[in-house]
Structures are given as structure tokens and as C-alpha cells.
Amino acid sequence: MNRRVLKEVLKEQGGRILLLVADGLGGVPHPEHDGKTALEAAHTPHLDELAGQSALGLTIPVARGITPGSGPAHLALFGYDPVEHEIGRGVLEAYGIGMELRPGDVAARGNFATLDAEGRVVDRRAGRISSEECKRLVDKLRAHIRRIEDVEILLEPGKEHRFVVVFRGEGLGANLPDTDPQKEGAFPLEPQGLDFKSRETARVVKAFLKKAREVLKDEPKANGILLRGFASLPKLESFEKRYRLRALALASYPMYRGVTRLLGMETPLSLKTFDDELAYLREHGAEYDFVYLHYKDPDKMGEDGNFPGKVQKIEELDARLPEILQLGFDVVAVTGDHPTPCLLKSHSWHLNPFLLHSRNGYAGMDGLPAFNERVCRQGSLGVFPSLEVMPLLLAAAGRLKKFGA
């Protein structure tokens, strides 16, 4: 929606909104599973019942044919154009684990990885090591690498195999491609700066990776590092200022918390599981106008190509839906940020199933029998950009006035 129009029609008061994002929810038909998607194969009586009382559709995360990362996909859901507001993953991860960045800092998301004797990537995630193991490895790196020349090296563990490295010094640029080759059997990519300042950063990054490889050489799994999403701090209008909503973000993974912290949402950093998120929601959800609730597991199963696992995780979410719906939100939307088809083992450009239920015009809107990709295609909301989700939620909550005379 045009920003000028939105500013003109926004109301201070209205219903409370819940946006439930099941990460990687959507998929494509799998030939080895009766030509169904995982969402179609899952037994989801509660989602199906809610679908029958809602309006359905499909969203385009960024643009047709464009496969989004999690950051851009979430920015679009929150109504921020991900092309206009491109934010590197490093900043999102850093904010997601509670780090504070200064102007000029360059942050990157790190993966501990397994490399063979020749330096090729055997496992990009080091067997998805535990968060405790990640912390041990980061402590080990910290003990040996504190500075590269005049550049301070700040390291913090994330979840499982993920961590954050921040390069802090004068004259650094963040215009560097990833060193992650995005596939096993390949060598990590050499750091390259794509402009003058970033070439200096690339030189420091290369020295850091060389030292890290030496420190980790005796580790059985995590003997290498892959870096992604080099970035510096962006400037973003706060979510509250944009929508006049007091917002709560509940996510147990750092990247998603990074997005919401950058937008100024209240973002507790102590949550470790979806159960933690639901407990916080029960205790504090009523204090907020807008709640974002994130469920990670379908994405993980999709990236592993685990079709039965993704089905199971969708069914586990469905089992929790009644307790979520009992919390009295006036508007409930259920969707994904991007599809993660098991067939592809990665994010994809396909469409996201979307469900919108409210007491203000969408109860029983379509009367369709199920919540899945094929049924959502028949819904009254049609196919629309994720950027239009927030205006729909605001309208359903009675938070938009008439435009014009």
C-alpha cells in the first residue's frame, strides 16, 4: 500500500492481531509421496476447520520467480519492501542474539562446517551440532583470535551450528559475497571485496578464516567456517511508527529476532523453543496490539528433504492451534514466509498458502474445506504480494478508515 495513503487512513484503535508464520510451510507436489505437498499429506483438522471459517489465498514472497531468504521474506510480511530495504543476514543474526552494532561495523553469519583433508565442504552445517557445542567452539576461537591488525573481532554463538562474527574497525565496507558455496563437495569461496572499502574487509576476513581453520583443525566435525550475509546497520522506520501498533515478536531463532528488533518490536531473547514462545504468548500476549509468532520446524525438515518429518512438524503445529485460538485475538493469519519443498531441499520461489480469519468480515468468507496450497488457490484473496499482508490485517482489525470523500 502507498505509504501516504496508509498514513492517511490508519486508526489508533482496533482489534488485536496474531500473525502465525510457519517457516517454510509451503511446498511442491512430491512424486514419491502420491504427488502431494507435505501440507496436503499432513492431518490438520484444526487448520482445516479454521480454513472453512476464513478467507484463503496465496502470497508471492518477493516477486515471481525470485527465491527469497528468510530476512527478505519476513520484511515483506511486515510490509517493508525487501528490495528497497535489503538487510544482510549478518546484521539480522547479530541483533537476534542480542548484540549491539555500531555504524561501520561489518557483521556476518557464520556456519561451523565439516571440511575434508583437501578443504572441500563435506557438511555445510557440521552435522547440526548442538548449541552447547557451538558455544564451546566460539569460546575456543575467542581465546585465539581477538584482533586482526587494527580490526577487533567480536564473536557470539547462535543456535546449533550458527554464530556471528563482527569486524569492528575504521574504513571497512560490507560489500562482500558469501564464502559459503551453498553445496557440499565444493571448496569454500575466497573472500572478495566488491568496492574499495570492502576489499580491505575481505583482506581481514581472509586472515580471520585462515587463523580459525588453524584453531579448529583438530575438531572432528566443526573444522571449518562458512560466512554469509556480510552487512552493516540499515535505517528502518519502526513498526510502531508505521502502523501505530504495539508489537510483540516471539521467535526462538536469532535471525527472525534480528528482523523484529531492527523494526523495534518487543523481542524477548530468552526463548529457546516453540513451547517457550507459547508460554510467553499466554502470559503477555494480551498486552500487545500485534503479535508475530514464529514456528521454525517445517523449514528445517524441508531443507533436509525429510518429507515425513515435515508432515509430522505441521501436524504438531496443528495440535497446538486450539490453545492459540483461545487467546482472544480479533484477527488471526496463518502463512509461511517462503516455501521450503522437500523435493528441492531449499527455499523456493513458489507461493505461500495464506489464511485470514477475523470477526470483522472474514469469518466463513470462503467456506473451503482445507488449508493447503491447492485449496488456497481457490480462495477469495487470490494470489497477491506478501507486501499486502499488513494492510489486509489492519483492515480486518478495523484499523483503517475510509480513504477519500
Image: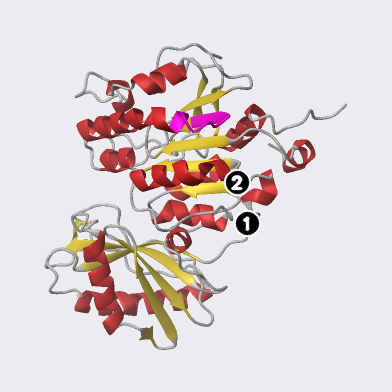
* Residue 97 location (% of width, % of height): 41, 62
In this view, which residue lies farthest toward the bottom?
A: 149
Does residue 212 sit above or below 13 in this rendering? Answer: below
Q: Which mark is residue 236?
A: 1
Residue to which mark 2 is pinned: 80
At 26% from the left edge and 20% from the top edge, which residue is drawn?
35
At 14% from the left edge and 70% from the top edge, which residue is drawn?
219
* Residue 363 location (% of width, % of height): 56, 17
Q: Quick one: 95 or 151, which is closer to the camera?
A: 95
* Residue 249 location (% of width, % of height): 50, 48
377 relative position to 39: left or right: right
Residue 187 falls within the magenta-colored stretch: no
* Residue 252 location (% of width, % of height): 38, 51
Residue 330 falls within the magenta-colored stretch: yes
Q: Quick one: 19 or 58, which is closer to the camera?
A: 19
Distance between mark 2 and mark 1 Cα atoms: 9 Å
